[in-house]
Amino acid sequence: MPLLAVNGLTKSFVTRVLFEDISFEAGLGDHIGFIGVNGCGKSTLFAILEGREPYDSGSIAFSHEAVLGTMAQSVEEGAATLFEFTADVFAELFRCERELERVNDEIEKNGATDALLERQHRLRERFEDGGGLTCRARVRSTLLGLGFTEDELEKPVSLFSGGQRNKAQLARLLLSGANLLLLDEPTNHLDIKAIEWLEEFLNAYRGAFIVISHDRYFLDRVTNRTMELKDRRLYKSKGNYTRHTELRSTARELEMRRYLRAKKEIARIEGMVEQQRRWGQQHNFVTAAHKQKAADRIKETLVEPERDEASIHFTFTAKEGGGNDAVITKGLGKSFGQKRVFSGLDMLVKKGEKVFILGDNGCGKTTLLNILAGKMRPSEGVALLGAHTEAAYYEQTMASLDPDNTVLEEVWGRYFNTISHRDIRNALGAFLFRGEDVEKRVGMLSGGEKARVQLLKLMLTRANLLLLDEPTNHLDIPSREALENALDEYDGTMIVVTHDRYLVNRLADRILHMTAGGIREYIGGYDDYLEALREEAEAGRGGEQKRLSANALEYKEKKQLQSELTKATTAVSRAEKAVTEAEAELDKVNALLASPAYSSDYVKAQELSGKADALSKRLESLYAEWERAEERLAELKSKTE
């Protein structure tokens, strides 16, 4: 039986039907990408599966083995540290640990009784079987993998940004032990390093998950099935996002051919019906009725192919002019008080280039764009725009939008002297703001709608230098594709900060990887960048080997390395053997404690209990020793490769 089975599910709000008669299953090993335009009902379906939202008809069945894991919408304020907040997922284990300590203390002070020993045994078994010996280490490694630092582990969650709190929620979810995850945009607010960590985790995940995401590169990396909610129907395919789009394109073409062929056949038959009726004889009416039934049968089975969703249609047109050197920085640096964000940044961007800036969160990418846009002064060095170069800035925060303006006021307020009211409305229509939508207050818009307003304003500037900070955030996949098409045709210069690796792959002429100490250049898109990093790593290893060969590494050094390798291998075997023996000894002690012969002898039972505690502590030490031995062996093996 699958972990989750959904059959004939229908959901509507008043007169709007979100989806109807949809069915799907999720079993162990199913890694499902869930896509669709903003507002089509994806998050509503998750709310239904979580029991937070009712549905109109259909059925939802979870197997008795299913353990559901979800992310909350927000994190409550509190004094808990990041580590405490995340480790709370193991609260039951910690309660068990505290109770075990209390029972141990009572046995030590007052002596053992049958009830106490039985209680002690059950608690220890529950604690160890639940992963109590490793849970704290797992919390730490998960948080570090998501990009938090050691210092931040003891920082109160209330002091973190919304994005960091979402990362903490994600850590809790990944540690929850659930075997069915519902993930709604889990890559939001993560930098590329953290996204890659998440990809590795999800690829190794043995349970099932359904992930809502607009990150196409991410979906291609982690999913083996895809569901698309479109026009109230659910389209399913085996394969990742790219494979799904290929299959859907073929299916749509076949559906359209069948539909048009059926329509043509209906028209042909009804033409014959009309002809028979015109002839007016009795047998002609009988034939006409027979033919009409045939046409009606075809109509009953006729299904209109899915309609294309409304999408943004626009182009960026750059003003003519501008020098060949569009952007120049020399020795650029920025500090905030005592904190240095970056320094020594030298950069040259030529006219017409599409340059993408990558780097970890906090390395100063947005700060650099603010300096180039003239919104912030550098602490050192210079940043210059070329002659006749006019920049337009897309801010990730969208702080330039006035929440009190209507959509029409926000756009037309800047261009009413140069663009007619009719042209502004046509432009808004191209960005999916039609009819009464233009009278909506900006402050009431969704993130995706605000992004469309800001993109429209950017387009109307006709600037020949675009500075874009995470331009695809909040956009669904069709809107991202429309933006990509527009930027691909743009003949001006672009400097883009983004975590959207699909966008980078399609458009980048160059990638600049930014760190606190400067910038490194890579030619091409994201896959080219990854390949260059691999080649650098291989060249580093190969260069070391060549150096050793060129210097004719002394026999003594080789001998020493081999000796260390042998010792490390022996140490691993010895550590593994010690762990096996200690585990076997602990099992024997626990078996004796559970036997009637010892449970009735308080003195012997107390001695055995103390021995079991000592063995448990020794095992923890042996596990750590085994891990260190494995790390040392791996390090030495890498030197011989």
Image (spheres, rainbow, N blue to C red):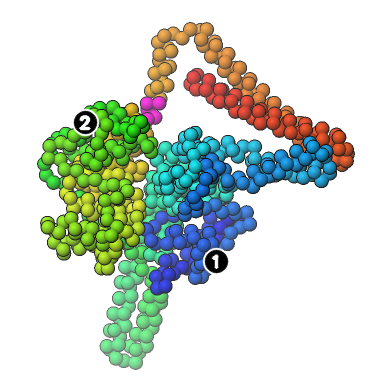
**Few, some or many C-alpha atoms within 10 Å of disc 2 (few <14, some 14-19, many ≥20)?**
some
As helix, strand or loop, the secondary structure at mark 2 comes to strand
Q: Quadrant of residue 106?
A: top right
In the displayed structure, does residue 26 sit left or right of residue 34? right
Residue 352 visible within the image: yes
What number is the disc on residue 257?
none
Q: How many badges with numbers are in the image? A: 2
- Magenta segment includes 333: no
Which secondary structure lies at badge 1? strand
Residue where numbered disc 2 is placed? 382
- What's the magenta region? 532-537
* Amino acid at the residue labelled 1: Ser
Left or right: where does residue 557 sit relative to residue 543?
right
Give the spatial CA distance, label 2 vs label 1.
64 Å
Q: Main secondary structure of the magenta part?
A: helix
In the rendered image of this protein, does residue 219 appear above or below residue 42?
A: above
Name the kind of residue labelled 2 in the image. Val
**Residue plotted at (31% across, 47% down):** 396
To which quarter of the image does residue 231 belong? bottom left
Give the image location of residue 235, x and y in percent. Answer: 43, 60
Say which residue label 1 marks: 59
Q: Nearer the viewer, mark 2 or mark 1?
A: 2
Residue 243 appearing in the image? no
Q: Quadrant of the N terminus?
A: bottom right
Question: Measured along the vertical axis of the image, is residue 229 above or below residue 359?
Answer: below
From the viewer's side, name the closer residue of 155 and 416.
155
Residue 464 picture quarter: top left
Residue at image point 84% right, 44% down: 114
Among the two numbered marks 2 and 1 on one chain, the one whose residue lies closer to the N terminus:
1
Residue visible at 25% across and 29% down in the picture: 380
Residue 349 point in image, percent of width and height: 21, 34
Crowdedness of circle 1 by 10 Å Cα count: few (<14), some, many (20+)?
few
